Amino acid sequence: MTLMHYSENEEQKNLLNHFLASNGVELSAETLDKLYKFADLVVDTKEYGNLISEKDSQKFLSRHIADSLVPYIYIGKDLKGKRWADMGAGAGCPSFPLAIAMPEVQFYAVEPRNKRVQFMNFVKDQLHLDNMTVVGKRFETSGLAYLDFVSCRALSTFENDWERAQPGLARGGQFVTLKSFNNIVHLENDPAVHIYKYALPQEEQEYALVTRGNE
């Protein structure tokens, strides 16, 4: 099945832009264009293996780009000069959309799988993302430390992800993760955790942005 370029996919663009607008966010035309180009690179690039399923390739903006931008919606203001690492970065979500939306933040996409690392370096060059560094290691051996933010998306349990992230955080830094709400409902009464529930366009389940500070 041949998919049109996302810059021409008005349905997907409208779903993404309505999602952003409903959350009080308006991105510049230049930023949106880079997001569309990133989506095309993930869907169309085949030499680094199968990066995304056929089903998800048809809704990449409304599902994956929208989800990746949730941390920007809730915490992405006034972060100039901050350092942010994403564990298990995979094909670049959420780190690349966040780096596109926040050029003033230095991002590290940390991923041990060589094919994914090659792909993300290719995308970095294609999109001229000077604020992105791809690190081809596990987070625990990356050498990254004193970070302002460490994130991950649907990696493991919240508890396991926090245990991995916490040693790399600066004091006062934040762990940020995107989960299905059903998987973190047990944290609702945990005073150390903040939960922001949200819905994605045309998706039935409920999602959550979960943060925990490194006190």
Image (cartoon, grey):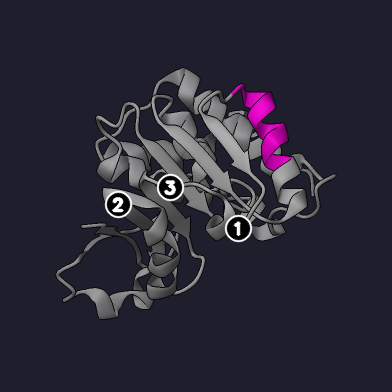
Q: Is residue 71 left or right of residue 188?
A: right
Quarter of the C terminus within the rendering: bottom left
In-front residue for pair 46/89: 89
Q: Give the structural element (helix, strand or loop) at label 2.
A: strand
Image location of residue 112, percent across then percent down: 67, 56
Q: Which mark is residue 174?
A: 2
Residue at x 26%, y 57% (from the top left corner):
214
Q: Which mark is residue 145?
A: 3
Circle nearer the viewer, 3 or 2:
3
Q: Residues within 10 Å of mark 1 (few under 14, many from 20)?
A: some
- Residue range in magenta is 119-128
Please say whether residue 54 is one of the residues in the magenta stretch: no
Label whose residue precedes the other's in the sequence (1 or 3): 1
Q: Which mark is residue 138?
A: 1
Distance (Cα) linking label 1 and label 2: 19 Å
Distance (Cα) linking label 3 and label 2: 13 Å
Residue type beneath disc 3 = Ala
* Residue 124 against residue 161 in the figure, above or below: above
In-front residue for pair 162/100: 162
Image location of residue 150, percent across then percent down: 41, 51
Please say whether residue 122 is one of the residues in the magenta stretch: yes
